[in-house]
Amino acid sequence: MILDHPRVAPALHVASTHAPVVELRQYTLHPGGRDTLIDLFEREFLETQEAVGIRVLGTFRDLDAPDRFVWLRAFDDMALRRDALEAFYTGPAWMAHRDAANATMVDSDDVLLMRPAAPASGFVLHDALPGPGDARDGGVIAATLYTFDAPVDFDFLDFFAAELHPAFVRAGAKAIASFSTEYAANTFPRLPVREGEHVFAWFARFADVAAHAAYRERLVALPEWRTLAVSLARRLQGPPQVLRLAPTPRSRLR
């Protein structure tokens, strides 16, 4: 996965990259409700979203928050996002099962609207959804979120591409995508998104929890890491947020 920004690769386009408008959705659920929602979601809300033009990229259990469900979905552009969401949320699947879904939720408004940070930095995944009962090991997806007090600029993208990303790779991360905030107006205000924030997010794949832990140990042991960490912290509004995500059985992203 190429994480270089447009100044490095101005004309690069990858046809198989999934739709460029991406929502990262983090739901806080009532205690014990996560498995109930996942079962319902995978049975009723995957094919039905895909049918109206929504690409459900990944569905996850947050390994550090037992009552959090995290998922990603994508759209070709903001206008099609509006049309697809209108079709789904007025359609038969949601109308039939919304009460059961909403009954599991405490909060569903933690939503980041994002675009690939560079032309080739979106997710590239197999198109087919895993079928019901798929027992493949999903590994761990690590999502790292950086927040800034202004939009992500070329200085940070240069720093990430030239210094941070190589260090992550040397420590054993397999980076698969990077995104920054989509600033277009929310075309479906019925579903709130986080506004007024400036975020850069990158995603990496690991074989399992142990592999991710080993990566973290190798990273902090790199001779250059202390200097890089200080330089990173000076650019950020606050500490990075790291989500350790376990794909559900029908997650495309795994």
Image (cartoon, rainbow, N blue to C red):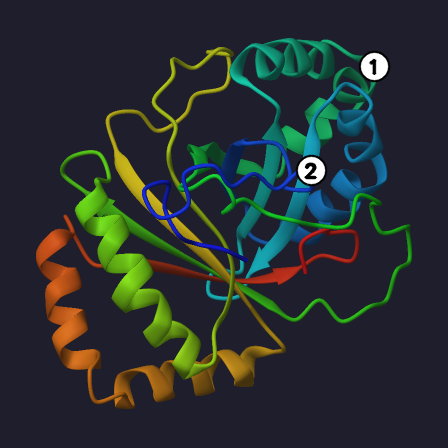
Relative to 137, residue 187 above or below: above
Question: What is the secondary structure assignment of the residue under circle 1?
Answer: helix
Question: What is the secondary structure assignment of the residue under circle 2?
Answer: strand
Residue highlighted by disc 1: 92
- In percent of width and height, residue 122 lies at 54, 44
Q: Is the residue under label 1 in contact with that under label 2 (CB below 8 Å)?
A: no
Relative to 230, residue 210 above or below: below
Residue 216's quadrant in the figure? Answer: bottom left
Tag count: 2
Residue highlighted by disc 2: 56
- In percent of width and height, residue 126 lies at 77, 50
- In percent of width and height, residue 164 lies at 29, 67
Residue 60's quadrant in the figure? Answer: bottom right
Whether residue 92 is visible here, answered yes or no, is: yes
Q: Is residue 105 left or right of residue 64?
A: right
**Mark 2 surroundings within 10 Å by alpha-carbon count, few (fewer than 14), some (14 through 19), many (20 or more):** many
Q: Which residue is drawn at 83% across and 14% down?
A: 92
Amino acid type, callout 1: Pro
Residue 218's quadrant in the figure? Answer: bottom left
Amino acid type, callout 2: Val
Relative to 127, residue 35 above or below: below
Q: In this view, does 248 lie to the left or right of 196?
A: right
| Quadrant assignment for the C terminus | bottom right
Cα–Cα span, label 2 and label 1 = 18 Å
